[in-house]
Image (cartoon, rainbow, N blue to C red):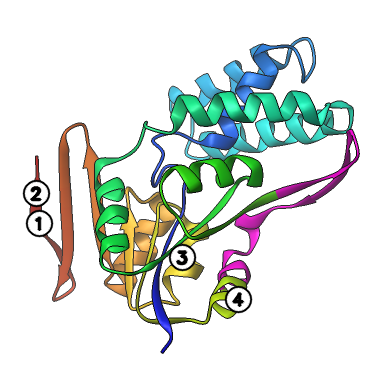
Amino acid sequence: MKKKFAVFDIDGTLIRWQLYHAAVDALASKGHLGLDASEQIHAERMTWKKRAHSEAFSDYEKFMIGLYEKALINLQPKIFDQIVNEVAEKYKDQVYTYTRDLILQLKKDGYFLLAISGSHNELVEIVAKQHGFDDWIGSTYNRNGDKFTGEIKVVSQNKKTELEKLITRHDLTTKGSYAIGDSHSDAVMMDMVSNPIAFNPDRRLFDYSRAKGWRIVVERKNMIYELEEHNGKYLLAKTNI
């Protein structure tokens, strides 16, 4: 019999911040991405934090990724691995209560746990193991010995394909399964399962979830708000303190 699964995004869904961003921040602050990298990233982030315009976060993210990928060819993998371990240790317990507890409950109920994230696979692997996932996929930055080759495979660009690979590998079924994510790139996974949950969704995922009638959960400070669709409207179904 095929086994049910639960697939989670990691950044912003389990971990309260973006692991990718944290790793790039750490590399930049230690001078591994160029002399002014840390200041440039900070300036872009402040534009987003000031909500200068609706695409400020997207612009900040694109800038940060571009800066990292440009410097990648000159970055030593051993330095990157050291940073990865530091970031994973720092953020492993900085999690959302709702998704942390959902992972524990679903594992107890016998679900096969998957993590698919756009963050570096090295980071995803550490965090996934820390939280008891059975398999995971993150973005790959290929290496050749003691150098990065510059070849990149970004998972967030096609999470549907990556999930299909895991389903085939482990003989899983989408019927009765869960998918939990916070951004529009997660919608393709959520479309595949019986139980999609939009957790702290961005605008595009919220609009898509509303059109689909999916369950929406918001965690803010020490409150969790669960919203369910009824006759075209979302109603507060439950709150947890």
> Nearer the viewer's eye, disc 4 or disc 2?
4
**Horizontal side, residue 191 vs residue 25: left or right:** left
**How far separated are the C-alphas under marks 2 and 1?**
8 Å
| Count of picture labels | 4
Q: Is residue 111 magenta?
A: no
Numbered mark located on residue 236 in the image:
1
Quadrant for the C terminus in the image: top left
Q: Give neighbour class at mark 1: few <14, some 14-19, many 20+ (Cα, 10 Å).
A: few
Residue visible at 24% across and 58% down in the picture? 105
**How far separated are the C-alphas under marks 3 and 4?**
22 Å
x and y percentages locating residue 180 in the rendered image? 38, 59
**How far separated are the C-alphas under marks 1 and 4?**
38 Å
Numbered mark located on residue 239 in the image:
2
Query: Which numbered disc flags the more N-terminal residue, 1 or 3?
Result: 3
Secondary structure beneath dot 2 equals strand
Q: Which residues, given as a range, are shown in magenta?
A: 140-163
> Nearer the viewer's eye, disc 1 or disc 4?
4
Pointer 3 residue: 187
Q: Amino acid at mark 3?
A: Ala
**How far separated are the C-alphas under marks 4 and 2?**
37 Å
x and y percentages locating residue 128 in the rendered image? 49, 48
Pointer 4 residue: 169
Q: Amino acid at mark 2?
A: Thr
